[in-house]
């Protein structure tokens, strides 16, 4: 005959034991390997058995991959499995694919990245010229920028911020990891005078502002961001 106390104890015991950390690492590893996009801790927790601690498993997995050909990296609020940077040359293609951006698009993207969250009016104030809807639409279509929160000001203007895809493309953990002017010049990506938006000023350093967006687009066809191979 079963005593009443035993029934209470049985009811409070979990139906399944929590997998050991080593098994949780294998689960996280499988999720990250199979996912084309970075995965958040919350998404991992929803997929894994009850009681698992994916955050601890991720940290342990990072240590396991230290110095190996793959790395576990943070992308915004999510995590992804990526090739070690020093081995990237092994995956290069003979033909490098490029995606051309106009000068207007490059300047707009830079302003959003360094000043986010920023409204369209603020972008135009920094650039000194109007921003066409096509430029914003292109960057949204590329999934490099997205809509942010509306400002609590007259008209409730929408703001723009960069996406996790933008950070992932350029190997950044957060927007705070964007290079400064000194680093950009050292890498040969900037001339002595930075483009609009990167100087932290609200206006050009004496540059004329008579050019139109269409002129920017025509002149900027030679400038581009290179897609990672």
Image: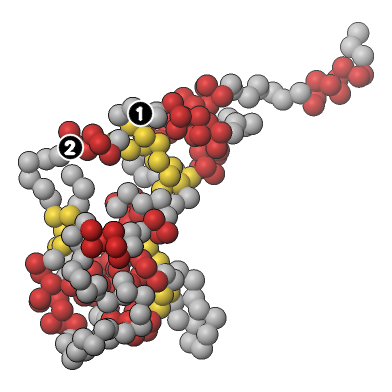
Query: How far apart are the alpha carbons under marks 1 and 2?
Result: 17 Å
Q: Where in the figure is residue 124, as x and y percent of width and height?
A: 31, 83
Q: Name, please, the residue furthest toward the top.
A: 1
What residue sits 91% from the left and 19% below the top? 5
Q: Where in the figure is residue 22, as x and y percent of width and height?
A: 52, 21
Where is mark 2, residue-wise?
89
Ranked by sequence position, the earlier of labels 1 and 2 is 1
Q: Where in the figure is residue 93, as x and y percent of width and height?
A: 11, 40
What residue sits 19% from the left and 82% below the top? 213
Q: Nearer the viewer, residue 132 or 181?
A: 181
- Say which quadrant the C terminus sits in: top left
Where is mark 1, residue-wise?
67
What residue sits 53% from the left and 26% below the top? 24
Q: Secondary structure at mark 2?
A: helix
Compared with 50, 77 (above or below) is below
Q: Residues within 10 Å of mark 2 (few under 14, many from 20)?
A: few
What residue sits 54% from the left and 44% below the top? 42
Compared with 1, 102 (above or below) is below
């Amino acid at each position: 005959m079963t005593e009443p106390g035993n029934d209470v104890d049985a009811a409070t015991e979990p139906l399944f034991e929590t997998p050991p950390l080593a098994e949780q690492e294998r689960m996280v590893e499988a999720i990250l390997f199979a996912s084309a996009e970075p995965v958040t801790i919350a998404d991992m927790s929803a997929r894994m058995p009850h009681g698992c601690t994916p955050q601890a498993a991720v940290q342990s997995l990072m240590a396991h991959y230290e110095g190996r050909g793959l790395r576990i990296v943070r992308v915004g609020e999510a995590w992804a499995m990526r090739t070690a940077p020093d081995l990237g040359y092994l995956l290069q293609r003979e033909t490098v694919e490029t995606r051309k951006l106009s000068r207007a698009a490059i300047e707009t993207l830079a302003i959003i990245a360094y000043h986010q969250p920023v409204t369209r009016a603020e972008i135009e104030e920094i650039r000194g010229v109007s921003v066409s809807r096509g430029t914003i639409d292109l960057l949204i279509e590329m999934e490099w920028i997205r809509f942010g929160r509306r400002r609590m000001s007259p008209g409730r203007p929408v703001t723009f911020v960069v996406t996790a895809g933008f950070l992932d493309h350029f190997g950044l953990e957060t927007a705070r990891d964007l290079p400064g002017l000194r680093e950009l010049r050292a890498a040969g990506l900037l001339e002595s005078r930075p483009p609009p938006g990167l100087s932290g000023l609200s206006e050009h350093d004496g540059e004329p502002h008579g050019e139109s967006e269409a002129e920017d687009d025509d002149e900027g066809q030679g400038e581009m961001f290179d897609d990672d191979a």
